[in-house]
Amino acid sequence: MSQARITEVATVAVPVADQDRALEFYIGTLGFIKHRDVELGPGRRWVEVAPTNVGTTIALVPAGEGAPAGPESGIRLITEDADADHAHLLAGGADVDPAVLRWPGVPAMFSFRDPDGNRLVLIERG
């Protein structure tokens, strides 16, 4: 039996109640860029965002019966400076953990939530 030829993860989906509100958070607060915003038909669109120069995108998909918004997205993001990003998000009014977590042998990290309560984790590059 031969193996699949999968080479990368292209997109992960995060269910959101309001794509415009989510887009504002991911672009305005996190500094992501918009990769796609495509009309799929009346009242339906496909929106993808990502940090600059990253291949994997986050699709902001409408929450529905099969995919309610929040709480755990499973998404882990990388930063060069967890303390600086924690302070930036906190100052910007984002829903951020009160402190950066530090455990022996583990990179500094903290969680934050988007406007729909989807939890993401920001981890300092180790």
Image: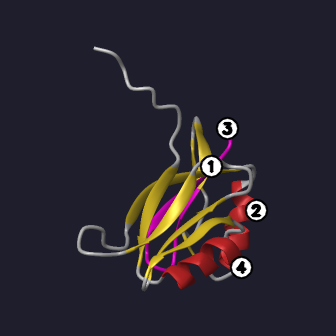
Marking on residue 126: 3
* Distance Cα–Cα, label 4 vs label 1: 19 Å
User: Would you say 40 lies left or right of 27 here?
Assistant: left
The image quarter containing residue 5 is top left
Residue bearing mark 1: 108
* Distance Cα–Cα, label 1 vs label 3: 8 Å
Q: Quadrant of the N terminus?
A: top left
On whether residue 121 falls in the magenta region, the answer is yes
Residue 37 or 118: which is nearer the viewer?
A: 37
* Distance Cα–Cα, label 4 vs label 2: 11 Å
Which residue appears at 58% of the width and 49% of the height? 56
Question: In the structure shown, which secondary structural element does the residue marked by tag 3 occupy?
Answer: loop
Amino acid tagged 4? Ala
Structural crowding at the residue carrying mark 1, measured as other residues with C-alpha within 10 Å and reported as few (<14), some (14–19) or many (≥20): some
* Distance Cα–Cα, label 2 vs label 3: 15 Å
Residue bearing mark 2: 84
Residue 7 position within the rendered picture, expressed as x and y whole percent measured from the top left: 52, 31
Marking on residue 91: 4
Q: Which residues are magenta?
A: 110-126
User: Would you say 120 lies left or right of 4 here?
Assistant: right
Amino acid tagged 2? Ala
Which of discs 1 and 3 lies nearer the camera? The answer is 3
Upstream in the sequence, badge 1 or badge 3?
1
User: Would you say 49 lies left or right of 117 here?
Assistant: right
The mark tally for this picture is: 4
Which residue appears at 55% of the width and 71% of the height? 38
The image quarter containing residue 84 is bottom right
Amino acid tagged 3? Gly
Q: Is there CB contact under 8 Å for labels 2 and 3?
A: no
Q: Is there CB contact under 8 Å for labels 3 and 4?
A: no
Structural crowding at the residue carrying mark 3, measured as other residues with C-alpha within 10 Å and reported as few (<14), some (14–19) or many (≥20): few
